[in-house]
């Protein structure tokens, strides 16, 4: 089926909180008992008196969600077995109908028991180590007197009954002055509350480790002190290190870095928004103007040239979609169909296209490695990158020249990758595109991958070519290098991660959109216009279409005996997202195929990390023929579901 979610989830219906859907992680939490159709009180009676029933009743009655952090629950996970204590982070999210009435509660959370135990063990280990250091320090008089750190025994009222000479050396206070002054009188006003909370924790046995606050010196200045405090025999034994120099240096460095990042961000935003506004305004002018002309001519009864203006609007819209994809690629936010690919096959299939694009004055040479590894990449995006690089190379050789494309295996070691950000050591397939053109100066080379930066005349280049390629390569977990000298030419080298599996053969493309045979498709899309377009298009192709505007209206259909051959759902939906809806749907329909459609989703950037067997993805905007072909292929393909 699909990969198990690390979080548990369940859907409870009605005021009695009857289980309708659960995921495998929820079954694992409560001991794999069958709870579907039972109320919470029937399914998990052992939690009576622990407050969970009352919380559910309150959420159902008020419509307000509940967020629980580190809450304790006692469960009997096996019949007749011992009771087990678990700790949970969870949310009770009410689901309402169109009138605002609560109908169900969606439960989602994490079992943090093991993580909590690990953190506690680590705290105890640290406390034990610090305690040993402090005991040795106080056992030796010379260490007490010579220590550059503040040492002392703090009583339960907040007074250091003992203090070593470092207090006077660092802060200027004598031992008598320290003993007669509460620590809360010496603290910086902004640190009083957080220190009081930490002090109360040490009094009940929780050690303070690297607890930082500011202490007032006798001259009125303040010093940053990092404390370790261990409670024993009604005292908190403390050691404090003066970290003022380090902390002030960190603050200044942070300010400088923030200022630099802000300046760089504003410069990039200004360049990016200016380029986007210019291109999109041109495209929108074409779309709006064409549609206005169509509307006017139809109103006048003149339909002779309508098709020409409709075509113009369609072309402008497609160009706008292409620009959006390029921007997502630059920002590493496009949805990639990464899989094992034969790079030599991709390059060979493009040779004729590249040769025609170069013209007669440029010689094309392809040097393909005989034993090339399989690369993990998106073949379509790689083709687009190679074509863009070839066109850039052609434009850099106005008098003609030589374009060389090579493929080879390579390994990047730690010494090399340490010089670059976000590059991992390992094995890569390298693809190089080299020209004998005019080359780039160091100043131009430094800005080569910046968005909307171009050396071409106005109207001849968008400035997105190399930035898009760079975004695609980085999103693919690869690497890009550019080598160039003025008058000597340029080489752009793409490093694609090696795949350990064999290459996947490309799927054949049908010339005509295949039709359906009355299969049932459930479309879940919250945008009414998009939902209507998808529904009408699929009905025109011969499918029986059901629709829902969000998950809460789709769930009853999925729970019913209604025939559904394919679920088509947007990724981003209100209340319950498309991925969670698919997971819940497969609980009652294990073999259901799912097609995700999305304009953008951070969770779906790399499809292999998001979808399971029997699932696929289609990025918005898409042609209706593409939708029809994808739906037909999924319905008529037998997926192997584990």
Image (cartoon, grey):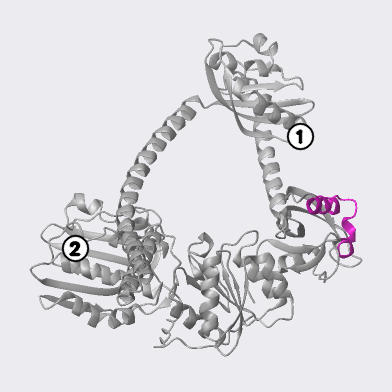
Residue 616 shows up from this direction = no
Quadrant of the rendered image containing residue 356 = bottom left
The N terminus - image quarter: bottom right
Q: Which of 230 and 120 is in front in this view?
A: 120
Q: The residue tagged with tag 1: helix, strand or loop?
A: loop
Name, please, the residue furthest toward the left. 399
Whole-percent x and y of residue 49?
90, 51
Q: Is the magenta stretch mostly helix, strand or loop?
A: helix
Name, please, the residue furthest toward the right. 80
Q: What stretch is highlighted in magenta?
A: 41-61
Q: The residue tagged with tag 2: helix, strand or loop?
A: strand
Name the residue rendered at 22%, 77% in the picture: 354
The C terminus - image quarter: bottom right
Q: Nearer the viewer, residue 165 or 318?
A: 318
Name, please, the residue furthest toward the bottom. 517
Name the residue rendered at 78%, 49% in the picture: 62
Count of numbered tags? 2
Magenta region includes residue 527? no
Whether pointer 2 and pointer 1 mark residues with C-beta atoms closer than 8 Å, the reply is: no
* Residue, disc 2: 490
Q: Nearer the viewer, residue 134 or 607?
A: 607
The numbered disc on residue 205 is 1
Name the residue rendered at 34%, 76% in the picture: 303
Q: Is residue 150 left or right of residue 474?
A: right
Whole-percent x and y of residue 385?
31, 69
Whole-percent x and y of residue 304?
30, 77
Residue 395 shows up from this direction = yes
Q: In this view, does 385 lie to the left or right of 511?
A: left
Whole-percent x and y of residue 591?
65, 81
The numbered disc on residue 158 is none
């Amino acid at each position: 089926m699909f990969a198990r979610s690390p979080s548990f989830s369940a859907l409870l219906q009605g005021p009695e909180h009857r289980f309708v859907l659960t995921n495998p992680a929820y079954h694992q939490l409560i001991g794999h008992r069958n709870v579907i159709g039972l109320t919470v009180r029937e399914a998990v009676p052992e939690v009576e008196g622990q407050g969970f029933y009352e919380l559910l009743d309150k959420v159902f009655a008020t419509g307000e969600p509940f967020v629980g952090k580190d809450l304790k629950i006692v469960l009997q996970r096996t019949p007749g077995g011992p009771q087990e204590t678990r700790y949970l982070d969870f949310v009770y999210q009410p689901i309402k109908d169109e009138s605002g009435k609560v109908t169900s509660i969606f439960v989602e959370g994490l079992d943090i028991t093991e993580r909590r135990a690990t953190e506690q063990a680590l705290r105890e280990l640290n406390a034990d180590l610090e305690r040993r250091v402090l005991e040795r320090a106080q056992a030796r008089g010379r260490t007490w007197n010579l220590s550059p750190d503040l040492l002392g025994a703090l009583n339960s009222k907040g007074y250091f009954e003992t203090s070593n000479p470092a207090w006077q050396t660092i802060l200027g206070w004598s031992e008598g002055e320290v003993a007669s002054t509460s620590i809360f009188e010496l603290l910086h006003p902004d640190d009083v509350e957080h220190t009081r909370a930490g002090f109360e924790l040490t009094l009940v046995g929780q050690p303070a480790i690297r607890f930082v606050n500011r202490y007032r010196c006798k001259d009125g200045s303040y010093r940053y002190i990092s404390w370790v405090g261990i409670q024993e025999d009604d005292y908190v034994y403390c050691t404090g290190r003066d970290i003022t120099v380090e902390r002030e240096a960190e603050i200044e460095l942070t300010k400088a870095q923030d200022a630099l990042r802000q300046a760089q961000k504003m410069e990039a935003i200004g360049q990016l928004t200016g380029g986007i506004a210019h291109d999109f305004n041109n495209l929108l002018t074409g779309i709006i103007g064409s549609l206005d002309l169509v509307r006017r001519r139809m109103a006048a009864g003149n339909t002779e040239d309508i098709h020409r203006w409709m075509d113009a609007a369609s072309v402008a819209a497609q160009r706008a979609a292409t620009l959006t994809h390029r921007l997502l690629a630059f920002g590493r936010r496009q949805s990639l169909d990464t899989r094992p690919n034969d790079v030599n096959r991709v390059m060979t299939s493009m040779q004729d296209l590249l040769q025609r694009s170069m013209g007669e004055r440029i010689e094309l040479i392809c040097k393909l490695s005989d034993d090339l590894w399989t690369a993990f990449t998106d073949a379509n995006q790689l083709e687009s990158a190679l074509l863009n690089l070839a066109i850039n190379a052609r434009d850099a050789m106005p008098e003609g020249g030589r374009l060389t494309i090579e493929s080879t295996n390579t390994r990047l070691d730690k010494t090399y990758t340490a010089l670059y950000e976000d590059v991992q050591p390992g094995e890569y397939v390298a693809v190089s595109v080299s020209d004998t053109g005019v080359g780039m100066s160091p100043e131009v080379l430094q800005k080569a991958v910046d968005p909307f930066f171009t050396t071409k005349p106005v109207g001849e280049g968008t400035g997105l070519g190399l930035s898009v390629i760079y975004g695609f390569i980085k999103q693919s977990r690869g690497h890009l290098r550019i080598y160039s000298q003025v008058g000597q030419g340029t080489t752009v080298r793409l490093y694609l991660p090696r795949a350990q599996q064999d290459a996947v053969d490309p799927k054949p493309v049908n010339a005509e959109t295949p039709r359906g045979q009355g299969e049932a498709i459930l479309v879940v899309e919250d945008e009414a216009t998009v939902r209507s377009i998808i529904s009408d298009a699929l009905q025109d192709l011969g499918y029986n279409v059901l629709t829902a505007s969000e998950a809460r209206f789709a769930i009853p259909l999925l729970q019913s005996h209604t025939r559904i051959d394919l679920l088509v759902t947007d990724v981003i939906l209100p209340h319950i997202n498309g991925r969670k809806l698919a997971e819940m749907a497969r609980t009652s329909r294990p073999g259901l195929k799912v097609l995700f459609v999305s304009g953008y989703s951070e969770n779906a950037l790399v499809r292999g990390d998001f979808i399971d067997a029997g699932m696929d993805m289609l990025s918005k905007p898409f042609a209706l023929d593409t939708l029809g072909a994808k739906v037909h292929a999924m319905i008529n393909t037998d997926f192997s579901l584990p």
